[in-house]
Amino acid sequence: MKRTALLAVLICTMSFCVSAQTTDSKHAKHKKKSHKTEKSVVVPPWAAAHKYDATAHVYFPDYYTFYDPARGGYVFWNEGKYTFTPALPPFLEKVDLSSSRIQILKGLSLDLHPEINYPYYMKQYPADNNNGALVPVPVPGNPAGN
C-alpha cells in the first residue's frame, strides 16, 4: 500500500514537472518572438569630444547646420531651402567638428525636424563668425524645405 501511494505521488510529481517544463519552454519561445530589435544608433565621429550620445538633435551655430540622429545626417541651408544629407555638407568637410561649438537640443523630440524652428535657434544661439562666407546662411522666415 505504501509503495502504491509513493508510486502515485512520484508519477504525479513527474507529470507536474514535465508539464511545468513544457509551459516554461512555451513562454521562452513566446518571449523570443516578442523581443523587439532596436534601431542601431550611429554616433558621428565628433560625438565623443562633446560627450554626445545621439539621443538629441545638435545645432552647429557657427555653420547654421543641424545634426539629426533620427535621420542619421545633417540639415543645412542650400539654394534657398533646407537640405538633408547623410554625409557632411561640403563646407564642413575640412572643419574639425570635434572642436566646434555645438548646442545639444535636448527639448526637441527626435520625431521633429530641427530646421522648422531655425529662426528661434538663430536668435538663441548666434554664430560667432561667418566662416569667410563659405557657409550658406539661412534666411529666417523662409519655409523649411523638405
Image (tube, rainbow, N blue to C red):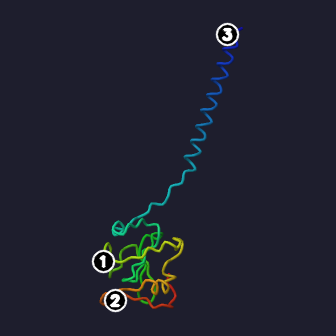
Residue 3: image tag? 3
* Residue contact at pointers 2 and 1, CB within 8 angstroms: no
Residue 61 drawn at (x, y percent): 39, 82
Distance between the Cα atoms at labels 3 and 2?
Answer: 94 Å
The total of numbered circles placed on residues is: 3
Q: Say what amino acid the circle numbered 1 marks.
A: Glu
> Helix, strand, or loop for circle 2?
loop
Q: Say what amino acid the circle numbered 2 marks.
A: Asn
> Helix, strand, or loop for circle 1?
loop
Distance between the Cα atoms at labels 3 and 1?
Answer: 85 Å
Residue 130: image tag? 2
Q: Residues within 10 Å of mark 3 (few under 14, many from 20)?
A: few
Q: Say what amino acid the circle numbered 3 marks.
A: Arg
Q: Residue at x 37, y 73 (%)?
A: 87
- Residue that label 1 marks: 93
* Position of 29 relative to 45 (above/below): above
